């Protein structure tokens, strides 16, 4: 029998047992959100030629009246040199000819009989982009340990990198268990419930930057559950189950995992909701067994699966953001367990989103996050400060009121 352990111990055990996937070269279209494992260095200066920042005229001297001798468009090489008293037509991004001292915008000029007259006094260097202005060859612009953004992808493309060395997206097999479950396109029978957890988990996996692989419902039979887990194991980097994680006569997840040779590191955590939570390694792949009640499943995913997936995909094991909030109401709880209560933030502070029963999912859908109440607490008065773990979609700079 596994000992009941604390939330902090459980998370530490899960992260200790999770190793990042092997890095590989990924095409740029696959790298947003991935963790970079190489230094990205400029292969050439940028721009590698001096260019015009305007549609206008390149001047060979600062004279207000010069003679027009040619032109250069973007993508063309300037195969002539400007001398004092000469100018040429030029376009944005085109390389300026040797001898260029300034570029004047076309709206500040007049042309007559092959001569250019500047209507404003030109200044040396104006509207010329110097070579290497952006960065120099050999400069490191992206470093290892960076979670790549769309802007980083643009920078890598600018530097001429078609691929980057990253930890790839994890494939996460999702298994829902229970004879009472029915798929969404099927009518509800007596004592049946819809298989909603699997869809919430699928969305949560995607929000973690991983790829969800949803398997069919596993009925409450050991041989059926084993077959589903074997299928999950064959095509995934991690497995997450929901339901069947407790110790009832028809809760088979723990025993089936043992029979399959899993090394189980924990089973049961001192928390509410989510006490029946399991973690182990099956053929070296992390397996997290979540409880079946909708709230418990959702909460334990965010508290444990999210940081596990972050580490699996090359991160440090980051979980939900948190901040300190004031309570808008008095709160009571049972001592000895760490409580995670769904709450919403308003002008008066944090208030609970109705009943905290673990089968009432509306409390999650209407909340901004989880109010975390330590084990020793029995009650907190209105106005007390508490820790709130924010859902990823909530902006703490503009919380809903």
Image (cartoon, rainbow, N blue to C red):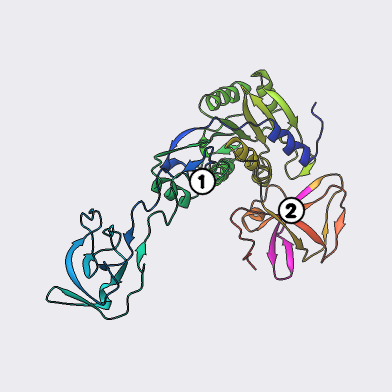
Between circles 1 and 2, the one closer to the viewer is 1
Identify the mark at residue 142; answer none if there is no mark.
Answer: 1
- The picture places residue 174, in percent across and down from the top left corner, at 56, 35
Q: Which portion, as a residue range, is magenta?
A: 339-354
Question: Looking at the rendering, in which quadrant would you find the C terminus?
Answer: bottom right
Instruction: Using the image as rendered, state which of residue 220 and residue 245 is in the foreground.
Output: 245
Q: Determine the residue positioned at 54% across, 27% down.
A: 232
Q: Main secondary structure of the magenta part?
A: strand
Rendering coords of residue 263 (x, y %): 69, 23
Looking at the rendering, which quadrant does residue 249 occupy?
Answer: top right
| Quadrant occupied by the N terminus | top right
Give the image location of residue 164, x and y in percent. 46, 38
Image: 247 above or below 147:
above
Say which of 320 and 346 sits in front: 320
Q: Give how far apart the Cα atoms at labels 1 and 2 are.
A: 40 Å
Q: Does 232 appear above or below 344?
A: above
Residue linked to disc 2: 341
| In this rendering, position of residue 118 left or right of residue 140 | left
Q: Residue at x 86, y 44 (%)?
A: 336
Query: Dot 2 surroundings within 10 Å: few (below 14), some, or many (20 or more)?
Result: many
């Amino acid at each position: 029998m596994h000992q009941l352990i604390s939330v902090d111990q459980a998370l530490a055990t899960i992260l200790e047992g999770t190793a990042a996937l092997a890095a590989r070269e990924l095409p740029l279209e696959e790298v947003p959100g991935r963790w970079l494992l190489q230094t990205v260095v400029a292969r050439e200066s940028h721009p590698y030629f001096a260019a015009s920042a305007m549609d206008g005229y390149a001047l060979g001297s600062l004279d207000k009246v010069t003679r027009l001798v040619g032109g250069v468009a973007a993508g063309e090489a300037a195969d002539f040199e400007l001398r004092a008293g000469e100018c040429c037509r030029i376009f944005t991004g085109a390389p300026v000819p040797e001898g260029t001292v300034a570029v004047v915008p076309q709206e500040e000029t007049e042309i007559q009989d092959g001569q250019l007259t500047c209507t404003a006094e030109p200044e040396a260097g104006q509207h010329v982009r110097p070579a290497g202005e952006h960065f120099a060859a050999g400069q490191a612009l992206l470093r290892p340990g960076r979670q790549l953004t769309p802007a980083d992808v643009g920078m890598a493309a600018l530097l001429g990198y078609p691929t980057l060395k990253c930890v790839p997206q994890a494939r996460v097999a999702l298994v829902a268990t229970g004879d009472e479950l029915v798929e969404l396109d099927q009518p509800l029978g007596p004592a049946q419930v819809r298989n909603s957890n699997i869809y919430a988990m699928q969305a949560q996996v995607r929000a973690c930057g991983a790829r969800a692989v949803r398997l069919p419902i596993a009925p409450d039979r050991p041989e059926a559950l084993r077959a589903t887990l074997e299928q999950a194991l064959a095509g995934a980097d991690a497995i997450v189950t929901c339901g069947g994680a407790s110790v009832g006569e028809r809760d088979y997840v723990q025993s089936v995992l043992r029979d399959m040779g899993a090394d189980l590191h924990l089973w049961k955590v001192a928390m509410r909701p989510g006490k029946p939570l399991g973690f182990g390694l099956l053929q070296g792949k992390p397996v997290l067994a979540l409880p079946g009640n909708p709230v418990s499943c959702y909460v334990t995913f965010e508290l444990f699966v999210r940081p596990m997936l972050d580490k699996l995909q090359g991160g440090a094991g980051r979980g939900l953001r948190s901040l300190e909030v004031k309570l808008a109401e008095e709160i009571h709880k049972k001592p000895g367990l760490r409580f995670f209560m769904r709450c919403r933030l308003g002008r008066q502070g944090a208030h609970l989103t109705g009943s905290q029963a673990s089968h009432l999912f509306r409390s999650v859908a209407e909340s901004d996050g989880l109010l975390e109440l330590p084990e020793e607490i029995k009650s907190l008065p209105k106005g007390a400060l508490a820790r709130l773990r924010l859902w990823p979609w909530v902006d703490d700079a503009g919380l809903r009121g």
